[in-house]
């Protein structure tokens, strides 16, 4: 396997982008990624997209993207793993470059959620249609069940979850691409409307349009495109049971732990080596469970991490400096790639007010469904 | 939605039929073709008890379209005495009272009418045991 680097990145603003279609989101992000690296061609394209067929009635997204980017002819494949589609696309691109099959590959993620589809019903298709959705569960409902299980097992509180939202909004307020660039207080979170007990509106990530793209090449060729490449040290993916009811402990995300272990093993690093991480806070409880599963905190200790400042900018391991899914926004198939862009910027020293000082090693963790799939990548400054 | 999808599910939805793996004795609900415990493919059919205990729960305040008129409603993962776990609504009580540890009976109920054709969707709901 060859060593692989990210040499360019581009993304759209995240939000309700009424003037952009699904294809526009790809073209804007991909153009910015190629331009940032001075690249004028591609060998291959992977596009993470969860539900184009349901959100806008569009399948066959690989050729759509290549065609509208003026690159009809180039190999292009849509990759789907629900909300982990972006991470899975990055992993496919990484493996294609690492294998030696291609030298310049774009990993993108796109999702257009604000074109009139019933978002709650589309997202629910990432859970088990026959045993879960049939009975009336929603995605916030599944994470609410995870939250209640975590509260019962470890004493985690609604206020603990609220601090995750407060922290991530504080970070996101400094991100020019974030959907909600404003801070919220614990009182505001705790007073927001109830979606699925015990989760409130401000414990939930928003409905977002957005695109993101990163450009990958062999590390040995990275200097052709940038003097500050970021190396991909490891990539891990794992699955878990599709239905929450089939997990021995609904408060534990086994797929996240497995994916992190695999990525760490390949990278030759441990959780203690991570300087900055983007994790999948689709709901505030998810950040708590994910940092436990990755090993950034001990099991059961995730609840206090945001409140204590450990995972805030300036803390021991800043988590979701981009604002996370909560504040930056969560265009579902895009998120995994956008997470990689935040770490790319952090390790290059380009994160502005959100910069983690001397960040050398970063991690992204992207998750599908109620944790049925997870992708983890580990990155290192390559210059 | 075509009706074969519903007839296929009758054994588990109407009769709570589960499968016990002949290789490792694991109880699988609904039945599958491959055992998630040992990858065995030989099973015998068994019916679940119509009772169980709440493992975790929530109250849905923002429902899917088909359940609009029912919100807020409680949902729980219920574990039967045989160790099978299933997702179910818990009804005939204050939804906020449905918490881990609650004992429920599983009763056969209408869940919803789906789509323009109004297909009747049946299944089991939990009812607190008093």
Image (cartoon, coloured by chain):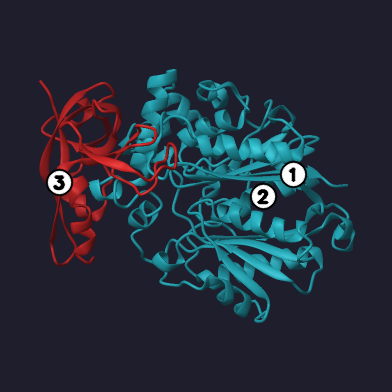
Chain colours: A cyan, B red
Q: Secondary structure at mark 1?
A: strand
The nearer-to-camera label among 1 and 2 is 1
Q: Whole-Å distance between the Cαs marked 3 and 2?
A: 47 Å
Q: Give the camera-side residue of A51 and A352.
A: A51
**Image position of A40 with respect to A273: above or below:** below
The image position of residue A363, as x and y in percent, is: 68, 40
The residue tagged 1 is A379
User: What residue is drawn where x is 56% and y is 52%?
Assistant: A335
**Does the residue at mark 1 contact the one at mark 2 (Cβ under 8 Å)?**
yes
Q: Residues within 10 Å of mark 2 (few under 14, many from 20)?
A: many
Q: Is residue A177 visible?
A: no
- The chain letter for the residue carrying disc 1 is A
Q: Which residue is mark 2?
A: A340
Residue bearing mark 3:
B14
Give how far across and how far down residue A223 sits, in percent: 89, 58
The quadrant of the picture occupied by the N terminus of chain B is bottom left
The answer to whether residue B80 is visible is yes
Horizontally, is A56 left or right of A231 in the view? left
Write down the quadrant of residue A107 in the picture. Answer: bottom right
Tell me how far mark 1 sits from mark 2, CA to CA: 9 Å
For this view, does A301 lie left or right of residue A37? left
Both on one chain, marks 3 and 2? no
Q: Position of residue B108 (x, y in %)?
A: 11, 41
């Amino acid at each position: 396997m060859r060593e692989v680097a990210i040499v360019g990145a581009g993304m759209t603003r995240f939000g309700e982008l009424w003037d952009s279609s699904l294809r526009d989101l790809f073209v804007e992000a991909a153009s910015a990624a190629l331009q940032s690296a001075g690249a004028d061609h591609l060998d291959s394209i992977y596009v993470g997209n969860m539900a184009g067929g349901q959100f806008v009635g569009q399948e066959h997204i690989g050729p759509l993207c290549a065609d509208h980017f003026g690159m009809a002819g180039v190999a292009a494949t849509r990759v789907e793993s629900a909300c982990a589609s972006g991470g899975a696309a990055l992993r496919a691109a990484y493996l294609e470059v690492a294998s030696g099959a291609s030298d310049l590959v774009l990993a993108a993620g796109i999702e257009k959620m604000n074109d009139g589809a019933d978002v709650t019903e589309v997202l629910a298709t990432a859970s088990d249609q026959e045993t879960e959705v049939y009975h009336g569960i929603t995605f916030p409902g599944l994470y609410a069940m995870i939250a209640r299980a975590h509260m019962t097992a470890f004493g985690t509180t609604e206020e603990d979850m609220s601090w995750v939202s407060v922290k991530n909004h504080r970070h996101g307020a400094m991100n020019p691409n974030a959907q909600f660039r404003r801070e919220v207080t614990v009182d505001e979170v705790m007073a927001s409307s109830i979606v699925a007990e015990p989760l409130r509106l401000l414990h939930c990530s928003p409905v977002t349009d957005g695109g993101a793209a990163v450009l990958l090449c062999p590390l040995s060729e990275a200097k052709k495109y940038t003097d500050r490449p970021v190396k991909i040290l490891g990539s891990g993916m794992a699955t878990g049971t599709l239905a929450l009811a089939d997990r021995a402990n609904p408060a534990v995300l086994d797929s996240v732990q497995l994916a992190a272990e695999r990525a760490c093993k390949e990278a030759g690093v441990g959780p203690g080596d991570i300087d900055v991480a983007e994790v999948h806070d689709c709901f505030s409880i998810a950040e708590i469970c994910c940092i436990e599963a990755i090993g950034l905190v001990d099991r059961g200790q995730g609840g206090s991490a945001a409140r204590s400042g450990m995972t805030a900018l300036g803390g021991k391991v800043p988590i979701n400096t981009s604002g996370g899914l909560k504040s930056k926004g969560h265009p579902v198939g895009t998120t995994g790639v956008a997470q990689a862009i935040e770490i790319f910027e952090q390790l290059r020293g380009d994160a502005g007010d959100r910069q983690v000082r001397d960040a050398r090693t970063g991690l992204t963790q992207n998750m599908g469904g109620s944790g049925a799939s997870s992708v983890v990548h580990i990155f290192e400054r390559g210059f | 939605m075509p009706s074969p999808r519903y007839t296929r599910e009758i054994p588990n939805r109407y009769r709570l039929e589960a499968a016990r793996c002949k290789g490792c004795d694991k109880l699988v609900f609904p039945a599958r073709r491959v055992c998630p415990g040992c990858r065995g493919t030989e099973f015998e059919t068994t019916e679940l008890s119509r009772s169980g205990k709440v493992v975790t729960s929530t109250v849905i305040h923002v429902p899917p379209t088909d359940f609009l008129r029912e919100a807020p409603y409680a949902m729980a993962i219920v574990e039967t005495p045989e160790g099978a776990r299933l997702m179910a609504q818990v009804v005939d009580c204050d939804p906020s009272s449905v918490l881990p540890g609650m004992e429920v009976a599983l009763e056969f109920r209408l869940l919803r009418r789906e789509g323009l054709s109004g297909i009747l969707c049946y299944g089991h709901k939990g009812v607190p045991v008093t």
